[in-house]
Amino acid sequence: MIKFTYFGHSCFLIEGSKGRIIIDPFLRGNPHVKVNPNEIVVSSILVTHAHADHLGDTVEIAQKNKAQVIGVYELVQYCLKQGAPNGHAMNLGGSYRFDFGEVQLTPAFHSSGCPDGSYGGAPCGFIIKMDGKTLYHAGDTSLSLEMKLIGELHNIDVAFLPIGDNYTMGPADAANAVEFLKPKLVVPMHYNTLPEIQQDPEDFADKVGDLARVKIMGFGETYEM
Ligand code: NI
Ligand code: MN
């Protein structure tokens, strides 16, 4: 069994039998969560790309927990330079078996500059295999044909997909992504945190129809599967 908690935007805390991880821990700057990064207990932090609304409080959480930062090479180097104690650099297409489970980096069509303007490497998404479940976190991305391949190669239990539009795919393209990915469950993310990404998640759920079950998560809500 795994448990995931949504902290708004693209941030999820995921707990399995072999560890706890957090993805894109944008906590302090997030208008909807009242979670102090100091309270987060994890062994690994997965970061999809260098933008502040994803990198967020990564370095602070890594320091506090002596946790490793997992992501694309350039972004991990940036985090180490900023004081993260430990990192595991990867790149697109690569998988690695960690204590908590297996992670593969998937392509994301986006940009990725570090807060200081340095190059953050390529943006990515993650396929995470934990406790017999397959999770796909798309990161910030447009709709892409790669998702069709991911859907064909993997049996996705849950897909976390951006629906905010403007910076990523919007509800219509995200529903097309569901058709490609064929997940059992889809959780919309990356919406309603900024003025330019206001969306009605129910509208997304209508567009998905019976392609997959849609779980609209409240901020701080936990789901078990
Ligand atoms: Ni971004
Ligand atoms: Mn973003």
Image (cartoon, rainbow, N blue to C red):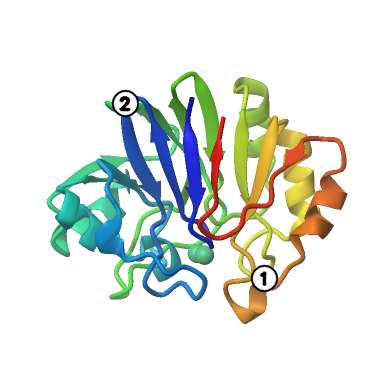
- Note whether 17 is above or below 15 in the view shown: above
Question: Is label 1 in a helix, a strand or a loop?
Answer: loop
Mark sitting on residue 18: 2
**In this rendering, does residue 83 appear at all?**
yes
| Residue at 21 percent of width and 53 percent of height | 62
Mark sitting on residue 166: 1
Left or right: 154 in relation to 129: right
Determine crowd level at label 1: few under 14, some 14-19, many 20+ residues with C-alpha closer than 10 A: few
| Residue at 42 percent of width and 52 percent of height | 122
Mark sitting on residue 61: none
Residue 4 x %, y %: 49, 42
Residue 135 x %, y %: 53, 33
Question: Is label 2 in a helix, a strand or a loop?
Answer: loop
| Residue at 28 percent of width and 47 percent of height | 73
Front tag of 2 and 1: 2
The answer to which of marks 2 and 1 sits earlier in the sequence is 2
